[in-house]
Amino acid sequence: MSRYWSKVVDGLTPYVPGEQPKLPNLVKLNTNECPYGPSPQALAALRAEVGDTLRLYPDPNSEGLAASIAAFYQLKPAQVFVANGSDELLAHAFLALLKHDEPVLFPDITYSFYPVYCGLYGIEYRQVPLTESFEIRIDDYLTPNGGIIFPNPNAPTGRPLALAEIERLLRANAGSAVVIDEAYVDFGAESAVGLIDRYPQLLVVHTLSKSRALAGLRVGYALGDAALIEALRRVKDSFNSYPLDRCAQAGAAAAIEDRAHFEQICAKVIASRSRLASDLAELGFDVLPSAANFVFARHSRHGGAELAAGLRQRGIIVRHFSNPPRIAPFLRITVGTDAQCAALITALRAILA
Ligand SMILES: Cc1ncc(COP(=O)(O)O)c(C=O)c1O
């Protein structure tokens, strides 16, 4: 606190990102990064961009990258917006599309950045409880609202929602924007991208941080009707005209174009996830069905905080949330390589013994 702070800053409760420890040799299963490296073609494109042209500002609208993304999804470039990580994109979406007189709706257990954006931009919100089994129930969203946002699959539960349910929501909710945050969709959920041409209120948000193994590059993109994209662009150009540097634009475009590498990464993570889930179940964990690159699991006899601390002592970090209390018994565990998952299971076996 300082006398120089604005009222807005004084009232903020910022998001707390997962730890990025400096210690070497930790098994890092806490921030849902990809355990495999990025596309070699992306790395080559990044390197090729390091040179004299760095004197010059990058393309403010990342048109080459937007064209690659549009081609991947068979959309028009005007239906694509790119940003410096999907976090930045989500921030723009809250201001551009979700700030209205009625409150924006999102689940009570979800990506904890959403209420932070509301705090930053002074947006009213209402948190809609998940069901007993930690599912999003669309009927609970069929009320007057200033917009709706949730991840599919949801985070940190990993539970997917069927596309038919999202379409039911879109049919019933034409009057406000519906933002589906598909950060983890490539690991097994159904994408809503195919609905974009029929529902002008739908914005689908993706990231290169998970299924393209490029969390360090900071690239996210949104897909939707050109009018929604224009709204995001108006916010971007009132905030930072050049959110993606030249290297990020080149590397991201090459990553999108390397479909084989992307598909291989996703297949490996999905296979490891099912082994990890069954190994955890054998140790007495209740594991929620996950379509993401992480699992959300609780043990019948041991608390989440206790298990997270025990794992940390053994050089393994996972994510534990003490709030809301309903999820305090859970650990959110990123699906690592098979060797990392095996190390986790060995450590848990020792802790539970
Ligand atoms: C649901 C969800 N959305 C968005 C993001 C942000 O991803 P990024 O800013 O790396 O693109 C995350 C990050 O973990 C997430 O869990």
Image (cartoon, grey):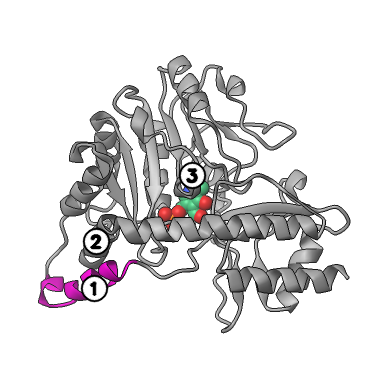
Which residue is drawn at the image coordinates 29% and 26% (left, top)? 197
- Which residue corresponds to mark 3? 117
Q: Quick check: 151 above or below 172?
A: below
Residue 44's label in the rendered image is 1
Report how far apart the C-alphas of labels 1 and 3 lie in the structure. 35 Å
At which x and y percent is residue 71?
Answer: 21, 44
Magenta region: 39-55
Identify the amino acid type marked 2: Ala
Which residue is drawn at the image coordinates 37% and 47% (left, top)? 89
Name the main secondary structure of what is drawn in magenta. Answer: helix
For label 1, count other residues whose C-alpha is less than 10 Å away and answer few (under 14), some (14-19) or many (20+): few
Looking at the rendered image, the quarter that the N terminus falls into is bottom right
Residue 195 appears in view: yes
Identify the amino acid type marked 1: Ala
CB of mark 2 within 8 Å of CB of mark 1?
Answer: yes
For label 2, count other residues whose C-alpha is less than 10 Å away and answer few (under 14), some (14-19) or many (20+): many
| Drawn side of residue 55 relative to residue 263, left or right | left
At which x and y percent is residue 2?
Answer: 54, 61
Which of marks 3 and 1 precedes in the sequence? Answer: 1
- Which residue corresponds to mark 2? 254
Which of marks 1 and 2 precedes in the sequence? Answer: 1
| Drawn side of residue 152 relative to residue 90, left or right | right
Front position in the image: 235 or 255:
255
SS for tag 2?
helix
Q: Quick check: 338 above or below 71?
A: below
